Amino acid sequence: MSFLGGLSEGVETVAVHSLWLIFPGAAWEIASVRALLVMASSVQRIIAGYRSLR
């Protein structure tokens, strides 16, 4: 089971786009945090896939 549980998909996409509209001056910070979450989720899925195929 992944730690983030699919955090980088779905509802948070709407939240991120809403935050960009509310705080346009902080867009790069919001994008950076989202990129880190997507990367963490991707690594977890790769590890889970490797373990299931092993």
Image (spheres, helix red, strand yellow):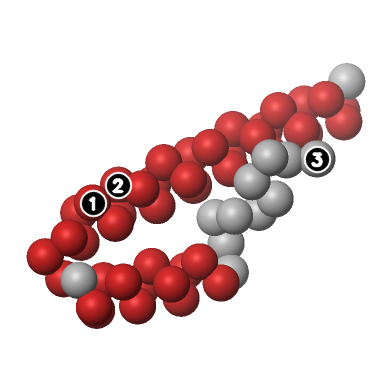
Q: Position of residue 25 (x, y in %)?
A: 11, 65
Closer to the N terminus: mark 3 or mark 2? Answer: 3
Q: Residue at x 87, y 31 (%)?
A: 52
Count residues near mark 3 (Cα–Cα under 10 Å), then give few for <14, some for 14-19, many for 20+: few
Residue marked by disc 2? 32
Q: For this view, does 37 lie left or right of residue 5? A: left
The dot on residue 1 is: 3
Name which quarter of the figure residue 54 lies in: top right
Q: Amino acid under label 3?
A: Met
| Quarter of the view holding residue 7 | bottom right
Q: CA distance from mark 3 to mark 2?
A: 25 Å
Disc 1, disc 2: CB below 8 Å? yes
Bin the neighbour count of mark 2 within 10 Å (Cα to Cα): few under 14, some 14-19, many 20 and up: few
Furthest toward the left, the residue is 25
Which amino acid type is shown beneath numbered disc 2? Ser
- Mark 1, residue position: 29
Residue 31's x, y, as percent? 30, 54
Q: Label 3 vs label 1: CA separation?
A: 28 Å
Give amino acid for label 1: Glu
At numbered mark 1, what does the secondary structure look like: helix, strand or loop?
A: helix
Marks 3,2: beta carbons within 8 A:
no
Apparent side of residue 41 relative to residue 30 in the rendered image (left or right): right
